[in-house]
Image (spheres, rainbow, N blue to C red):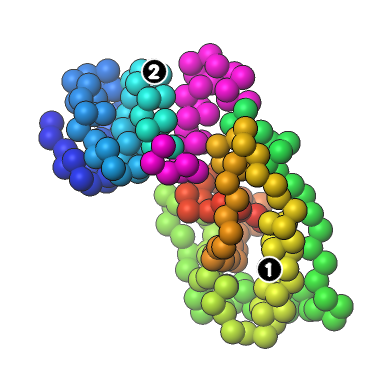
Amino acid sequence: MRTTPTRWQSYKNLSDEPESWTKQSPYRGVRQRSNPTQPTSTSISACCFQKGQNWDSALTSFNETLTQQRWHVPALATKAVNQHEAGDDAATTSLLDMDGLRTLQELSLPDGTDVQALGDLLANHSSCIWERSDTTTPAGAQRSNLAKDTDPTIGTFLTTLKEKIESYFRTKQPDPGHPFTAHIPESWDYGIWATILDQDRHQDPHLHPAAWVSGVY
C-alpha cells in the first residue's frame, strides 16, 4: 500500500480501514511514511498504531505531534486513551484533569431579554441546516456562526456571553504541569453555533480541534 506522505488525509483513510488490518503490513511503516512537519499526519499515524495496540509507537507519534503543536486537541485526547490502554492511569488522569479543566458558571442575561424570542429566532433562522446521520448531531440542525450575526436580539446575548468568556480568560493562570493549560492564548476568535435537536435527542461526544475553550449554554 502507498500513501501520499504530504497529505494527512491519506493517513486518516488508512486509520479508518477495517480492524482486521491493524496488525498487518500496511501499518508497519506508517510512522516512517508520515510527514514529520505535519502534526495532523503524525497524530493520525499514532491512531493507526493505537488500533494495532502498539502503544509505545503510538505514544512516540503523539509526542511528536505535541512537539509540533503543543495543544493539538485530538492528539491530547487520544494520547490519554493510549495511556489508559497501556496501563498508565496516572498519566491518563493527569491529562484528563476533569476537575481542573471543567467549570460551571451562570450566564445572567440583561433584564428584559426575551429568551423565548431568542430561541424562536434561532430555531427558525434560514441558515439552519439539518445534519447528516453520520455527524455529531444526527437528529438536529445547526445554525451558522452567530459571532458574525447582526440581529440585535442575538447581539444582546453575544455581548453578555463574550464578557463572560473574557472574564474567564482573565482568571486563568498558566499551569506548567499540564500540556494544554501551560500556555494561555493572548487573543482568539469566536465560533458560536445554535444547535436545534429533536425532542429527547443529544449531540454525540466530539472534539473541537481548533478550540482552546469550548462551552455549552
What residue is at 50 percent from the left and 43 percent from the top? 71
Pick whichever, 87 or 66, lies toward us.
66
Q: Quadrant of the N terminus?
A: top left
Q: Quadrant of residue 62?
A: top left
Mark 2 belongs to which amino acid?
Asp
**From what the image shows, is residue 113 above or below residue 74?**
below
Structural crowding at the residue carrying mark 2, measured as other residues with C-alpha within 10 Å and reported as few (<14), some (14–19) or many (≥20): some
**From what the image shows, is residue 29 above or below residue 141?**
above
192 sits left or right of 66 in the view = right
149 sits left or right of 169 in the view = left
Mark drawn on residue 162: 1
Label 1–label 2 contact, CB within 8 A: no
* Residue 213: x %, y % from top left: 61, 53
What residue is at 40 percent from the left and 19 percent from the top? 55
* Residue 9: x %, y % from top left: 27, 46
Pick whichever, 200 or 50, lies toward us.
50
Q: Which span of residues is magenta-colored?
A: 67-93
Mark 1 belongs to which amino acid?
Lys
Query: Residue under circle 2?
Result: 56
Question: Could you tell which of marks 1 and 2 lies nearer the N-terminus?
Answer: 2
Tell me the element at label 2: helix
Verify whether residue 32 appears in magenta.
no
Q: Quadrant of residue 153?
A: bottom right
Q: Extreme right residue here? A: 111
Structural crowding at the residue carrying mark 1, measured as other residues with C-alpha within 10 Å and reported as few (<14), some (14–19) or many (≥20): few
Counting every numbered tag in the picture gives: 2
Tell me the element at label 1: helix
Q: Quadrant of the C terminus?
A: bottom right
Verify whether residue 70 appears in magenta.
yes
**From what the image shows, is residue 145 above or below residue 153?**
above
Pick whichever, 22 or 94, lies toward us.
94
In three-dimensional space, the C-alpha distance between marks 1 and 2, rounded to whole angstroms, equals 42 Å
